[in-house]
Amino acid sequence: MEIYLFILFATLAVAAAVGMITSKDTVNSALFLVVNLISVAGIFLLLRAQFLAVIQILVYGGAIMVLFLFVIMLLNLSSEENMISRFSVKYAIAFLLGVVVLSQLLYAIASVTGTLPYVSPEMERVGTVEALGDALFSTYMLPVLVTAILLTAAVVGAILLAQRKFSGKENK
Amino acid sequence: MDPTLFSTLVMLAVVLLFLMPSAAVTVYAERRVSAFIQNRYGPNRVGPMGLFQPFADVIKLFLKEDIIPTGANRFLYTLAPMIPVTTAVITVGVIPFSEHVYIADLNIGVLYLLAVASLSVYGVTLAGWASNSKYSLLGGLRAAAQMISYELPMGVALASVILFAGSLSVLDIVNSQDIWWNIFRNPIGFVIFTVAVFAEANRTPFDLVEAEQELVGGFHTEYSSMKFGTFFLAEYMHVVIGSMLITTFFFGGYHLPFAGYWLPEMSVLAKSILDIFVFIAKTVFWVFVFIWVRWTIPRFKYNQLMRLGWTRMLPIAILNFAVLAVILYYL
């Protein structure tokens, strides 16, 4: 069951990634990327990395992609013709069914050739918040702090850049 | 079937059976309470005291014509109403109703709640965009901006709750409140969290998403029939869920006040029944507060809303978190 789910999520992730690159509508692309990120979170979950899975959804699926969509919609990058998308319910169901069939096919092939991945029980202890926090704030303390400072600097820089542009416009 | 999985599935079914009608009951309660607040009668014709009004409402919605505007993105237009309902339903997965009655006790419960809450933005945003109408688009964009802004104070307020429990599991957080509820230990966090929950549920005073005067119906302007009904359902489910979250994180969950001091040991069954009733009573109280606030406080202006979120609530939340962390460290 777990292995089957893994292959299902993996196929969904790859299919969504391909869909994201090939679809012409920017909003559809962004939504494909959301599907991709969520199925990757599903794979994390199957690997017992609960923390990573939820953070993936929280940060990428929730915050960053909403901002992407926000910008795309606000700037209205897609022209009026693209607004009437030909992407209908029929295609969506076909996409999902295709993914399910493909993943079953892959599962069958993999179980015959004996190349299925294996999740060891020790992995269960690696992915919890406690284990991750322990590793981050003892062994990797310095890199974490450096990254934190870097991120803070980047955020302050972004705000400064945005502010200067804003006041510059006002001066004109 | 594995017995844990089986009991989880049974719990899931029971909780869903209670959650779905709770939205209808809340709609009825809102109409009666708002009538009471405005000194009028409210719906009182269908059934005794108008109790069957929700059925009438739902039948009416079902019988309406379902219109998809030309120029709308059909797929996203159909998908959008399902997203808020889904996120509302899957939130219940980690809420404990009693010490022994819960669907799942995740190691990452709080983060799960935040992740699910962050996904519910998509429903409103996509509905606004897919309708291909300027009112809907503006409503959807406002919703996205508002939800992102209020997610941060909400997350930081929850972080200050985690400080007391020392765990991300929701069950541990509730059990850490058996004597002192978090509303007493962390009052600032409580206020911030409550305001953020109101904003996330898009309720007055934060309902700019659907401000009638300027945006007609906001993101659901173009929606009709059961697609509109689904948004309506989702809104009231979010009110119920929001009440459950406030109860769980700040109002002691299923604990009676200072229960650790005086409540005697009880059998598992008796304790579970008591817990569930306490939890439901608190949730009903918070649903009432939601309705009460809606019919008492006028709506903000949009710029005031954003300023409140970013320049007041977020710094106060971070400061509260830092101060509490220092106090708890030296205590």
Image (cartoon, rainbow, N blue to C red):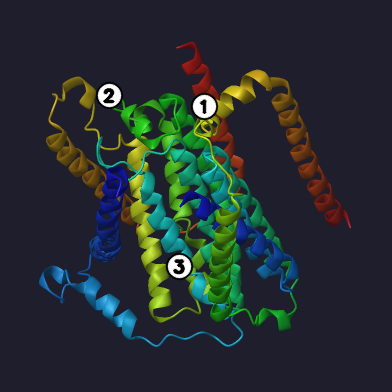
Q: Where B104 falls versus A150 (above or below)?
A: below
- x, y (%) of residue B314? 57, 39
Q: Nearer the viewer, residue B175 or A107?
A: A107
Dot 2 falls on which chain? B
- x, y (%) of residue B266? 13, 28
Dot 1 falls on which chain? A
Dot 3 falls on which chain? B
Q: Nearer the viewer, residue B255 or A121?
A: A121
Q: What's the mark number on residue B179?
A: 2
- Name the residue: 13% across, 24% down: B264
Q: Nearer the viewer, residue B80 or B61?
A: B80
- x, y (%) of residue A65? 65, 56
Say which amino acid is labelled 3: Met
Q: What's the mark number on residue A130?
A: 1
Q: What's the mark number on residue B82?
A: 3
Say which amino acid is labelled 1: Glu
Tell me, yes or no, if residue B135 can be seen here: no
Measured Cα–Cα span from mark 3 to mark 1: 35 Å
Q: Looking at the image, which residue sits at the far top?
A: B330
Circle 3: is it few (<14), some (14-19), or many (20+) Cα within 10 Å? Answer: some
At mark 3, the secondary structure is helix
Question: Quick check: A86 left or right of B211?
Answer: right
Q: Are marks 3 and 1 on the same chain?
A: no
